Image (spheres, rainbow, N blue to C red):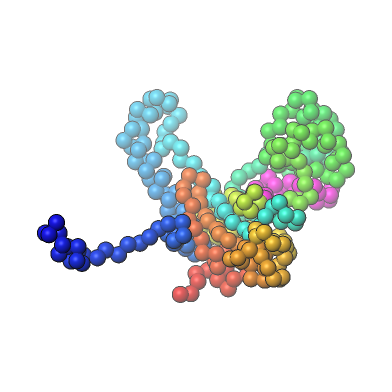
Amino acid sequence: MSALRPLLRGRLPTVARQYVTRAHPKPIERVPIGAAIGQVLEGVEARKAKRSERWEKHGDSLARRRGAKNEGPYRQQDESIEIALNLNLDPRKPGQALRGSVSLPHGSGKANRVVVFTSDEELARAAVEGGAAAAGGTDLIADIASGAVPVAYDRALATPEAMASLGKVARLLGPRGLMPNAKVGTIQPPDQLLAAVRDQVGGMVQYRTDRAGIVHAGVAKASFGEERIADNVRAFMNAIQDAKPENFGKGKKKGVAGAKGGKKGGTGGGAKAKFYLGAAVSSSQGRGVPVDLSTVDPTSNWFMSVPEE
């Protein structure tokens, strides 16, 4: 024991400890939106290169196993680029269940199968010519209700007069998110229906807050490139900002923008409450990259740019 006393008296080298606990979490590194998009695309290219390398090593055996159709790297798909926003919203409170749609300047890269409900036969024919997978009135609704026509669609549009007849298939359309709704622009007057069909077929993006106040949306494909992805992100964020409710907040107190009160930390919707709590960009097969909020907030001076140090 006497031999250890000099060591116990302070002669051991001191080591600085970094405490990472729930009270002292590790800081999250957030990058500007442009750098985040670049990192996501780098990950996409790295996965493609890895698949190509794997194909060079094992391509012959895979081709024999899967058939002669496999002439190149397998599973080389165009990954979707997605954005996730943590908003200071509580969907359980009135007016805070954010929901809508936005037409992106370069489209989402996903072609939607659209069904149109209208009693106007000429308009139904024009909708099919415009890209709709199916269009019709009471006959189409009856076929869907009987199961003769499967509900294999991504979006459903309707004119106002056709909504009364959709009660027969509400149980089929509703769980699939296909019930037309004015909030997301899927109920259109006859003179605007064809334009809505073109937008929906071209990949109009619908968004909706989940229970935690988070919005997920696919805004592009990796093949778009950084500039076009950034343009789509800009349009999406402007749409979210335009849809921002006057009253918001996840705190226990009533969240009224511009009023005092709210939960400690600015989450109760007070005068200094933040609407955007977090953001991340990811691809369909990659990890999310946390984004600097000042570069995706349309009210910020650094919106879609690099903040100054």
Q: Residue at x 35, y 62 (%)?
A: 18
- Front residue of 136/123: it is 136
Quarter of image, res 275: bottom right
Q: Position of residue 222 (x, y in %)?
A: 51, 50
Residue 129 percent across, percent down from the top left:
75, 40
Q: x, y (%) of residue 176?
A: 69, 37
Q: Can residue 103 be spotted in the picture?
A: no
Residue 25 against residue 166 in the figure, above or below: below
Q: What residue lies at 46% left-to-right and 37% top-to-bottom? A: 75
Residue found at x 19% / y 62% = 8
Screen quadrant of the N terminus:
bottom left
Residue nearest the observer in this picture, 87 or 61 = 87
Query: In the figure, is residue 73 to the left or right of 103?
Result: left
Magenta segment includes 197? yes
Residues rendered magenta in the picture: 186-208
Residue 137 left/right relative to 32: right
Quick check: is 196 in the magenta stretch?
yes
Return the residue found at the far left.
3
Q: Is residue 251 left or right of residue 226?
A: right
Q: Is residue 152 visible to us here?
A: yes
Question: Can you say whether 272 is above or below 39 in the image?
Answer: below
Q: Is residue 226 above or below residue 218?
A: below
